[in-house]
Amino acid sequence: MEILANAWLIPLFPLLAFVIILAFGRRLKESAAIVGILANAASLVIALLVFFERFAKGAGDYLNSSFEWLTIAGHSITMGFEVNQLNAVMLVVVTLVSTMVNIYSKGYMHGDNRLHVFYQYLALFTFSMLGVVLSPNLLQLYIFWELVGVCSFLLIGFYFYKPEARAAAKKAFIVTRIGDVGLFIAIALLYWWVGSFNYSDIFAAVNSGTLLSWQITLVGILVFVAAVGKSGQFPLHTWLPDAMEGPTPVSALIHAATMVAAGVYLVARMFELYLGSDIATNVVAYVGGFTAIFAASIGLTQRDIKRVLAYSTVSQLGYMMLALGAASAAGYISGTFHLMTHAFFKALLFLAAGSVIHAAHTQDIFEMGGLGKKMKTTMIVFLIGCLAISGIFPFAGYWSKEEILVATLASGRIDLFIAAVVAAFFTAFYMFRLFFLTFTGPEKVPQGVQVHESPKVMTYPMIVLAILAVVAGFINTPWKPALGDWMTQGMSFAHGGHESAPFWVTILAVGISLLGIFLSWLMYGKRSISNGNTARAFGPLYTLSYRKYFIDEIYHAIVVVPLRALGKVADLFDRYIIDGLVRLVASFTYGVGAAGSRVQNGQVQGYGAMMLVGLVILLITALVAGGLFVS
Amino acid sequence: MTSVLAVLTFVPLLGVLFLLLMPKSQQNMIRTIGILTTIIPLGLALMLYAGFDSASGDMQFVQQLKWITIPVGQMAMAINFEFGIDGLSMPLVVLTSVVVAMASLVGMKIKDRLKEFYALLLVMEMGMLGVFTSLNLFQFFVFFEFTIIPMFFFMGIWGYVNREKAALKFLIYNGVGSAILLIVFAVIFVNIWTLNFKEITMAFTDPNSPFNIPNTMGYLSENFRLGLFIALLLAFAIKIPIAPFHTWMLAAYKESNAAAIMISSGVLIKIGGYGLIRMNAAFFPEWMDKLGTAIAILGVINILYGAVLALAQNELKLMLAYSSVSHMGIVLLGLAAMNAEGFQGAIFQMVSHGLIAALLFYIIELINERTGTTDIRELGGLAKSMPVLSGVLLTVTMAAIGLPGTSGFVSEFMSYLGLFNAHPIIAAVGALGIILTAVYLLRSILGATFGPIRETHESLIDARSYELVPMVVILGLVIIIGVYPALLSGPMQETLINIVPRIGG
C-alpha cells in the first residue's frame, strides 16, 4: 500500500475527533482530551510514515485532484490533496506540535468546565491546518486558510466573557481578513488569467510567459498581503500580540508554531511565482526584514511574558520572509528550515511560559522571579528554548538562523543583513531578560500562591519539544545539508553546489547573540545595571518601544474613528434625507388619498365606476407607452 | 410527475381549507395542520430536485391548464396556467418551501388569531411558489400579488408596537412596484401579443423576429426597450431592495414578527433578483450588457452603503436589515458581471442569503423573546446562559461573513469572480465589503453573545427542541452547500448556458 496516496487520512482523524466531541462533548467532559490526543497521535503516525516514505525512500510527489467540487459554465473546479517535499515536512511539524499541545492541554485546562469545547476547537483547527498544507490548489488553500482563521478567532475568544478576549478575537479576525482579501482577489485574477487554481498550472503559466510580468508581480503582492495578515508581518501585525488573550496552549500551537507560519508556507509554496518578479521578492524581503527588527525592538520592553514571546514570533516570522525574499535556493531552504525549527522551540517556549503562568498566576515578568528553584524542569526547557531562539551553537535555531543570514548576504541586501544581525542581538537580549526575571533572583510571588512544578502531562510534551529544539538543526548542517538538498530536488531553482558560508558570519551571529545574553545577564541576572536607569537613559526610545510605536493608536485614529463617524453620518443621511423624502412623498399621497376618500361612499356601483376609470387610464397609458398611437 | 408543479403550488390552499374547518379553540390542532401542510410542498420540492434533469436547460415538469379566455377583437385570447421550472427557478422553489416550513414553527409562539396566522402563511406560500413556477407574465403577476397582500396583513397583525405603520409602508412600496410591473406587462402584451416568457424572450432576442427588424411594422426601438428595462429595474429595485429604495425594509424588519421577516428576507426579496434574470436579462440582454457598469456600481453602493449603515446600528434587527441591503448588493455584482460565473454567483447568493437571513432573524427574535430587547447595548455574554443558541448564531454569522465551508463563501466568491473579469476595478472596490461585513457582524453579534453577561440574563432558557429544528435544518443546508456546492451548481449549468450567451458578455 502506498502511504502517500492515503495522506488524506492525516486530517481525517482530527475531523473525526471534532465531530465526536461536538456530538458528545457534554457527556465526554474531560475524556474529550483523550479523543483529541488519540486523533492527533494517529495523524502524527501517518504523517511520519508519509515523511519517511517521501524523504528516505525518495518516493515522487503525489497529486490527487479529482474531486469535482463545483461546476461553473460547464467548467469543473476540483479539489484533492498533494504530497511534496515542502508539505511532507509541514505535516510532521503540524501533527507533532499539535499532539504535544493536545497532551499538555489535558493538564493545563484541567478543571475548566468548557474543556470539551476547547478540544473541539483544537481538533477543528488541526484538521483545517492540515487542510491548508495538503491543498493542491490556491482556492482549496484559501478555504482552509479561512477555517484556521476562524478557529484561531474562536480560541482567542475562548474566555468569551472577558471583554479583552472578545476584543482580541474580533481584532484577529478582522485584521487577518484585510490580508485575506488580497488572496481572494489574487485567486479571482488567476482564474481569468490562468484558468486554473492549481499550483502546477500557475507555475507553468509563469514559466511559459502566459502570465505577463506585471501580472506576476500583482498576484505575488496580493498573495503576500494575505501572508502578511496571517503571519503577523508589519503593518498587519497588531492582532498577534493581542491574540495572547487565548489559553496559552493555543498560543503555542496556533500563534507560534503552525497557523502564523501558514503565511510563510504560502510564500514558499508559491516560490516559483515569486521567482518571476523582482519587485514582489523585494517586497517580501523588505517587509520581512523590517518586521524582524521592528518587532524585536518592541519585545525589548514588554512586561507580559506572553507578549514578549508574541513579538518574538512576529520577529522570527519576519526572518523567514526575509529568507524567502532572497529568491534563491538558499533562501527557500533556510526560510522553511527556520519555520520548522522555530515551530519546535517557540512552541516549547510558550508551553514553558504556560507552565510558569499556571504556577505563578501572573503574566507580568516583574512579578515573577526565583521560580527556577521550584520549577527545575520548566526552567531547563525554557533555557533550551532561549538558547535555540538566540541561535547559540549547536541548538536548532543556530543552524536555521545562520542559513538565513548567509542567504540574505548572498542576495546582496546588505541593509537587510545588518537589520537581521541587530534583530538577533535584540532577540538574545529580550529572551534572556525573560529567563533571568522569571527564573532567577529573589522570589516575588506573593505568599498565598503555592509555586510548584507542573504535572507530568505538561512537562513531558515540553521535554519532547526541548529535545527537538536541541537536535532538529542537525538535519541540515552546512557540511551535510540533507534537508536542503532533498527539499530542492526537482525544483526549477535547485542548484548543485551549496552556498559556501563565510566563516565570519557564524562568528558574528553567535558573537552578537552572546553579547545580547551578556548584557541581559548584567541587567537582569547580576543586576549591576539598573533597568530603571536604562529606561530613563533611553527616554523617548523606551516609551516608543514600550507603547509599540503607537501603531494601535494610529490605526484607531485613522481607521476606526473615521469609519465610526462615517457610519453616524450615513445613518443620519438615511434617516432624515432618504426616509425623509419618502415621508414627504407619502404625506403628499396621503393628501390625495384623503380627497379620494370622499369618493368612497360605500356604494358598490361607485367602486365599479372607479375601477373602470382606473382600467381605462391604465390601458391608455399602456397603449401610449406601447407606442401604438405613434406610428 | 406531470402535474407536480400545479399540486406543489396549490397544495397550501388545501391546508387553508382544513384550517377554516377547525374551531378556534383547537390551537394545537391548528398548529399541527399548519406545520404539516408546509411539509408537503417541501417534500414535493425535494422530489423536484431529485427528478430534475441537469442535462437540460429548458423548462421542466411543464404543465398547462385552461384558465380564462379574454375576447380581443375577433380573437379569443386564452390565458392558461403554465407551470414549469428550470435551473434558475428550481433552487428558489426549494428555498421557498424550506423557509416557509421553518417559519411555520414560529406559530408555536403565536396565541392570538392563530388560524389566520397559518392561513395567511399558506396563502403566501402559494403566492411565492406560484411566482417561481409561472411561465407567463399574467400568472406571475397574480401570484406576485398573492405574496404582497397577505404579507401586509401578516406584518400588520403580529408584531410590535408600530407594526401597522410598518406594514403600510411595505404595502405602499410594494404596491408601487407592482403597479410598475403591471404597466410593463401590459405594454409588452399589447405589443407582442403574448405573455409567455419564452415567446417574449424569442420575440425580443431572435434576430428574425419582426420586432427586431428595423423599418418594419412591428419594430420595437432601442429606446422603447430601454424604457421597459428601466421600469422593470425600478420595480425589482424596490423589491431587492436597491438603495435608496430600501427604507420600507427597515420599518418592516424592526416591527414585524419572526415569520414575516423570515419570509420577506428569505424569499420575497429574492423575487427581485429572480425578476432581473428572468425578465431584464432574458428580454433585454443588450441593455443588461450596456448598463452592466451602472448595475455593478449600484451593487457596490448597496454593499458599502449597507455595510457602513449596519456598522452604525445598535439595534440587531436594523443591523440585519442593512446587512440584507449589503448582501443583496452581491447579487447585483453577479448580474453585472454578465458571465456564467457571475450569474451563478447571483443565484447562489439568493439561495444562500435566503437561508442565512431567515435563520439570523429567527434567532434574533428568540433572543428578543427571552430578553425583551435586541439592542446590543443591553445585551452581552449570552453565550454563557444560552451556549447552543449563541453557538448556532455565531456559526450562521460566520456564514453571512462568507466563511468557506458555508454557502455564503461560494456565493460571494462566484459573484466577485464573475465581476473581476468584467469590471476589475469596481470589483476591487466592492471587495472592501468583504472586510466591512466582518466588522459590523462581529461587532454586533459578539456584542450580544460575548463579554460580561447581565444579571437578569444569567438564567435564560437555551434553545428548546422545536426551536432547534430551524437551526439544524437551515444550518445543515448552509453547510452542505458550502462543503459540496456541486449539488446546487449542477442543475444550473444548462440553464445558465441558455441565458448567458444571449447577454454576449
Image (spheres, rainbow, N blue to C red):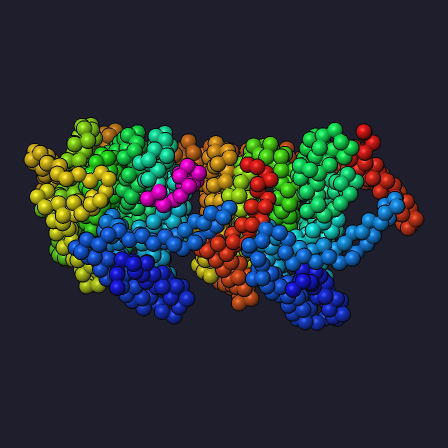
Q: Residue drawn 59% across and 38% down?
A: B503
Q: Residue A610: which quarter of the image?
A: top right
Q: In the visual, does B216 lie left or right of A238?
A: right
Residue B490 vs B240, above or below: the answer is below
Q: Residue A441: horizontal and vertical position, in percent?
A: 13, 48
Q: Residue furthest front?
A: B208
Q: Residue B352: horizontal and vertical position, in percent?
A: 53, 51
Residue A289 vs A441, above or below: the answer is above
Q: Residue drawn 8% across and 43% down?
A: A479
Q: How many marks?
A: 0
Q: Residue drawn 75% across and 58% down?
A: B65
Task: Classify the position of the N terminus of chain A by image quarter.
Answer: bottom left
Front one among A36 and B377: A36
Q: Residue drawn 30% across and 41% down?
A: A270
Asked if the magenta segment contains residue A186, the reply would be yes
Asked if the magenta segment contains residue B157, the reply would be no
Decide if residue B139 is in sight here: yes
Front one among B374 and A412: A412
For the stretch drawn in magenta, the main secondary structure is helix
Q: Which residues are magenta?
A: A184-201
Q: Residue A433: which quarter of the image?
A: top left
Q: Residue A554: which quarter of the image?
A: top left
Q: In the visual, does B355 lie left or right of A366?
A: right
Q: Residue B60: horizontal and vertical position, in percent?
A: 63, 56
Decide if residue A155 is in sight here: no
Q: In the visual, does A403 lie left or right of B280?
A: left
Front one among B375 and A212: A212
Q: Residue A302: horizontal and vertical position, in percent?
A: 25, 40
Front one among A53 and A501: A53
Q: In the visual, does A175 lie left or right of A105?
A: right
Task: Classify the position of the C terminus of chain A by image quarter.
Answer: top right
